[in-house]
């Protein structure tokens, strides 16, 4: 029987000085393959707004869309922890609606949710989620849902004082009950200091080598999404070229009568074929 990755698994990895992997997935088959590959956490990231739905920011994806993708991913996973990003304004209006949206994601198959920010209100949301039995992953540093108030895609924690502020925020998240914290676009040295001063593990999203976990958008890693490549995203494949080449070859084969072949069609039994030929001859 496959042992499911849990919050206890993640904390044990941190305590043992080991590392864990996180990748995004937005569909059943990708999630299934990532799970088989041994990825520890599969995140239905709100990055799907751009890489799967073609929006220009994460702000435009909603709860209904995240629900559909969560269901699809959860069906493909046996071992990994499934975490759903709570989309923009899905937890910011009031505690009641936040809990409703969060709990629905769990009903759809998520094992945990990710919530950005650290305000007193968000800390309260996190506490209520954990009290309700929903593990929460925090997210600090560059927080995409706060893009407009941050003022752009800016690196966070670039000074000693800024690093201490993020650490203070992280400790508040820790006290609220998060089981891990994503640090996005934070200098490596700052992320290391923050990580060393927390009990829960941190997850690097462009925050260097010293966090316990590393996360990437799978479409960046596969080389499928080509509109923009973050500095920290390593390209492990070239799916864009693979898809283009396959599609071009298919187009050529169809237009030149090379697809389908004899082995790719269904045929009538010989007696049925004779009757068809006789009928065709009679009509002529």
Image: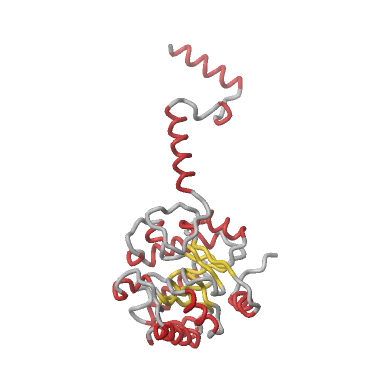
Q: Position of residue 85 (x, y in %)?
A: 44, 69
| Residue situated in front as seen by the camera: 65 or 246 | 246
Residue at image coords 45%, 39%: 247
| Residue situated in front as seen by the camera: 22 or 81 | 22
Q: State the image quarter where residue 87 is shown.
A: bottom left
Residue 124 visible:
no
Q: How is the image coloured?
A: secondary structure
Could you tell me which quadrant the N terminus lies in?
bottom right
Q: Left or right? Give the position of 202 relative to 59.
A: right
Q: Height in image: 76 above or below 122?
A: above
Could you tell me which quadrant the C terminus lies in?
top left
| Residue situated in front as seen by the camera: 103 or 247 | 247
Q: State the image quarter where residue 261 is shown.
A: top right
Q: Position of residue 59 (x, y in %)?
A: 33, 67
Q: Height in image: 242 above or below 182?
A: above
Counting labels gives 0
Residue at image coords 33%, 79%: 93
Q: Height in image: 164 above or below 145?
A: below
Q: Residue furthest right?
A: 1
Residue 14 visible:
yes
Q: Position of residue 231 (x, y in %)?
A: 43, 63
Q: Left or right? Give the position of 21 relative to 188.
A: right
Residue at image coords 41%, 65%: 46
Q: Left or right? Give the position of 25 relative to 5.
A: left
Q: Left or right? Give the position of 8 relative to 203.
A: right
Q: Position of residue 23 (x, y in %)?
A: 52, 63
């Amino acid at each position: 029987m496959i042992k499911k990755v849990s919050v206890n698994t993640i904390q044990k990895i941190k305590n043992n000085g080991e590392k864990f992997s996180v990748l995004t997935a937005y569909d059943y088959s990708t999630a299934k393959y990532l799970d088989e590959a041994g990825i520890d956490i599969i995140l239905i990231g709100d990055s799907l707004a751009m890489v799967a739905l073609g929006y220009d920011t994460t702000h435009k994806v909603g709860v209904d869309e995240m629900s559909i993708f969560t269901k699809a991913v959860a069906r493909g996973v046996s071992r990994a922890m499934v975490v759903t990003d709570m989309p923009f304004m899905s937890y910011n209006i009031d505690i009641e609606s936040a809990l409703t949206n969060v709990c629905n994601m769990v009903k759809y198959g998520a094992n945990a949710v990710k919530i950005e920010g650290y305000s007193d209100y968000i800390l309260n949301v996190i506490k209520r989620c954990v009290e309700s039995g929903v593990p929460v992953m925090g997210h600090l540093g560059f927080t995409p849902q706060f893009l407009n108030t941050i003022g752009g895609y800016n690196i966070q924690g670039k000074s000693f004082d800024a690093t201490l502020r993020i650490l203070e925020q992280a400790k508040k998240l820790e006290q609220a009950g998060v089981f891990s914290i994503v640090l996005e676009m934070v200098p490596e040295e700052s992320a290391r200091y923050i990580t060393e001063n927390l009990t829960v593990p941190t997850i690097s999203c462009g925050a260097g080598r010293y966090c316990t976990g590393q996360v990437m958008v799978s479409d960046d890693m596969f080389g499928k999404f080509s509109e923009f490549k973050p500095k920290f995203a390593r390209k492990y494949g070239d799916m864009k070229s693979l898809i283009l080449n396959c599609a071009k070859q298919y187009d050529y084969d169809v237009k030149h009568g090379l697809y389908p072949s004899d082995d790719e069609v269904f045929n009538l039994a010989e007696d049925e074929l004779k009757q068809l030929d006789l009928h065709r001859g009679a009509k002529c």
